[in-house]
């Protein structure tokens, strides 16, 4: 018990151990062969919360900066990860999850500056279990995003994922007059 709790002190840590149960109906084992009283071991895995926890509702939303990659997880069932970020009007952004753990399946929601109006949502981008939203901010302000597991009953080991916000390059086409001389 103590080792597992110590190992879980790091954000997003996962620890796997074998759990044994010993059966003895009277509380004292008096037989010489006690091996038949111990169950076969069951492997369990515990996951600690990520470094951004306390973000299960919008009031605890952590800042996500442009170009930043946040390592996150769903350490327990119903875990929800809220973030807030600054966007500039008429700029296109990509908000995405990637590098998903083997038990992760993200669902991504984008909310307006009021934190309540849903602007976009995505699940299973491009045939994967990751999520991605490409979006142009209508005005400069603080916007919000929510990431949750597709299945609210899943949490714990293997649910890690990365979250990032990037700005898309804008390509401008410039037409110049073409002069042809003999």
Image (cartoon, helix red, strand yellow):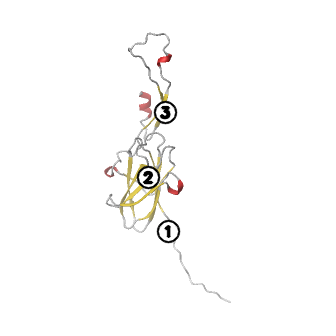
Q: Which residue is mark 2?
A: 107
Q: Which mark is residue 85?
A: none
Residue situated in front as seen by the camera: 54 or 129: 129
Q: Is residue 171 above or below residue 46?
A: below
| Quadrant (top left/top right/bottom left/bottom right) for the C terminus | bottom right
| 55 on left or right of 67 | left
Q: Secondary structure under badge 3?
A: strand
Number of numbered discs: 3
Q: Nearer the viewer, mark 2 or mark 3?
A: 2
Residue situated in front as seen by the camera: 14 or 76: 76
- In three-dimensional space, the C-alpha distance between marks 2 and 1, rounded to whole angstroms, equals 27 Å
Earlier residue among tags 2 and 3? 3
Check disc 1: other Cα within 10 Å, few if <14, some if 14-19, many if 20+.
few
Asked if the residue under mark 3 is in contact with the one under mark 2, i.e. CB atoms within 8 Å, the reply is no
| Quadrant (top left/top right/bottom left/bottom right) for the N terminus | top left
Q: Secondary structure under badge 1?
A: loop
- In three-dimensional space, the C-alpha distance between marks 3 and 1, rounded to whole angstroms, equals 46 Å
Q: Which residue is mark 1?
A: 170
* Res 29 → quadrant: top left
Residue drawn where x is 51% and y is 73% of the image: 172
Earlier residue among tags 3 and 1? 3
Measured from the top left, where is residue 111 in percent x and y?
37, 59
- What is the residue that sits farthest to the right in this orientation? 182
Measured from the top left, where is residue 145 in percent x and y?
39, 55
Residue drawn where x is 43% and y is 19% of the image: 23
Q: Is residue 85 above or below residue 89?
A: above
Measured from the top left, where is residue 107 in percent x and y?
44, 52
Q: Which mark is residue 16?
A: 3
Measured from the top left, where is residue 110 in percent x and y?
39, 58
């Amino acid at each position: 018990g103590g080792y597992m709790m110590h190992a879980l002190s790091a954000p997003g840590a996962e620890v796997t151990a074998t759990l044994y149960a010993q059966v003895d109906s009277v509380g004292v084992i008096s037989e010489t062969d006690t091996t038949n009283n111990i169950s076969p071991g069951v492997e369990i895995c515990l996951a600690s919360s990520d470094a951004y926890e306390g973000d299960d509702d919008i009031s605890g939303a952590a800042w996500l900066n442009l170009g930043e990659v946040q390592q996150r997880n769903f350490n327990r069932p119903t875990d929800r990860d809220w973030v807030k970020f600054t966007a500039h009007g008429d700029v296109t952004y990509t908000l995405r999850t990637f590098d998903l753990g083997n038990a992760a399946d993200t669902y991504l929601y984008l909310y307006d500056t009021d934190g309540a109006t849903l602007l976009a949502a995505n699940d299973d981008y491009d045939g994967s279990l990751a999520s991605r939203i490409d979006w142009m901010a209508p005005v400069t302000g603080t916007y919000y995003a929510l990431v949750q597991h597709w299945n609210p009953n899943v949490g714990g080991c293997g649910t890690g994922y990365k979250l990032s916000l990037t700005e898309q390059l804008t390509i401008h086409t410039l037409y110049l007059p073409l002069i042809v001389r003999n």
